[in-house]
Image (tube, rainbow, N blue to C red):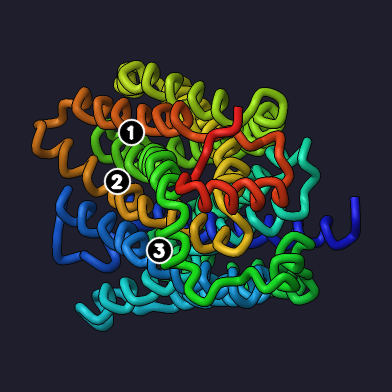
Amino acid sequence: MEKNFKRTIMASLIGSVLEWYDYNLYGLMSALVFNKLFFSDIEGSVGVLLSLATFGIGFLVRPIGGIIFGSLGDRLGRSKVLIITILLMGTASTLIGLVPTYNTIGYWAPLILVFLRILQGLGAGSEYAGAVIAIAENAPIKRRGFYASLPYVGVSIGILLSSGIFGLMKMLPQSDFMAWGWRVPFVISIILVIVGLVLRAKLQDSPVFEKAKQQQKRVKHPTITAIRTAPKGIILAWMTSTAENSVGYFFQTFLVAYVVSNLHMSESLTLLSLTALGFVNIFSIPLMGLLSDKVGRRPVIMGGGIASALFAFPLFWLLDTKSPILIVLSIVVGSCIFKGAITAAQAAWFTELYSTEIRYTAFAVGREFPTIIGGLTPTIASGVLILSNGHTWVISLLIVIFSILPFIAALIGPENSHLSLNEINNNQQKNQKNGSILKASN
């Protein structure tokens, strides 16, 4: 493995660690803490609902970040943009740990919190796309699925770190935790930022991107070009990403609040579940990425969608037993059968849907617009649960609907896992000339 490729993997990984450290931490805080600190004048489920809504707000701006920084990544280079995104995410996260609470500055507190959450969302809007593309464009064809899945290992590491540090802080006396302990996990994220900047400072763009630059194939307006030339690829990504984000955040955020608020179980149990989930995903995601190199991206994605739909109703049957072992097991299994398959395979699949000159923008647009739905899923699920008087079958039905989307997308989408990115570029050009934007390769 070349030295630059190793650095690319590590630099991409650390960015994913930071992104999901921030997002999982914010999700935990919004479910368990922020309603008491920033919405202390509103009690009960409504306070939790508003707190979860601030979590969803960050997702509203992710597509904007994807368009802005994805476009810059296609025009200026992947490496430059990866430095900008890690700075934006890390700075916002650190500052969240310094925001005064409602009792100190009143309504300014939630307003500042929302503003910083928006900055987080802008930076995160192209972080994942850039990390995956940086690796995939340098990876060997026969292992592209495996290597492209590695940024999501960073997701699991980020979840483990944030859950672990949050758990350590929760060991403080409650008064100390609410006074200052909750701030510590946010402030120390600056360490990840520094490490990421050191790794990304010397990154080089991939040979396939440099070739496109030398051949002057870069386009002036990547977003417009992507929408005009690759609409099917973007729609396929929308379908898959809608499910990935919705089901993913359902497990990581909504179920945390459900287990604590509705089942009246301990917060430590939910933290244990997230820790176990993160640990298992460290192994399951690369294995699914490797499997996608063997059998193709589409079969892995379709299998994940089917498994997730089948588990939707048994999930709540297990949770409602209030058995700690079954609660942990159901959250881990439910998330892993979905995340491990769909998330791992989609990384390389999205990369293979687009040509080099629009890849970053199209990837970001295709993935990040659905995060609006995904980020709001905990809020939507909480509202639906209230309106249905606590009947969880409605929530299970939502999971089934979301799980069907990636199955359909993979069923009608192309299989390009056996092609080099240069071959994909050539095929895209031929298809555009023939009036066919994306042509399945079987």
Residue 38 lies left or right of residue 4; in this view the side is left
Q: What secondary structure is found at the residue carrying circle 2?
A: helix
Question: Which residue is identified by label 3?
Answer: 62
Q: Where is residue 186 in the image (x, y as percent from the top left)?
A: 51, 67
Q: Can residue 249 be seen in this view?
A: no
Q: Position of residue 149 (x, y in %)?
A: 65, 43
State the mark number for residue 245: none
Type of amino acid at the residue the image marks with label 1: Phe
* Residue 67 or residue 214, whichever sits in front: 214
Q: What secondary structure is found at the residue carrying circle 3?
A: helix
* Residue 56 or residue 174, whichever sits in front: 56
Count the marks: how many? 3
Question: Which residue is identified by label 2?
Answer: 378
Label located before the other in sequence (2 or 3): 3
How far apart in space, not on screen, are marks 2 and 1 (Cα)? 14 Å
Is 40 drawn above or below residue 231 in the view shown?
Answer: below
- The reply to whether dot 3 and dot 1 touch (C-beta < 8 Å) is no
Label located before the other in sequence (2 or 1): 2
Residue 13 lies left or right of residue 355; in this view the side is right
Q: Position of residue 240 (x, y in %)?
A: 43, 39
Question: Which residue is identified by label 1?
Answer: 402
**View extreme (right): residue:** 2
Quadrant for the C terminus in the image: top right
Is 300 drawn above or below residue 437 in the view shown?
Answer: above
Residue 328 lies left or right of residue 200; in this view the side is left
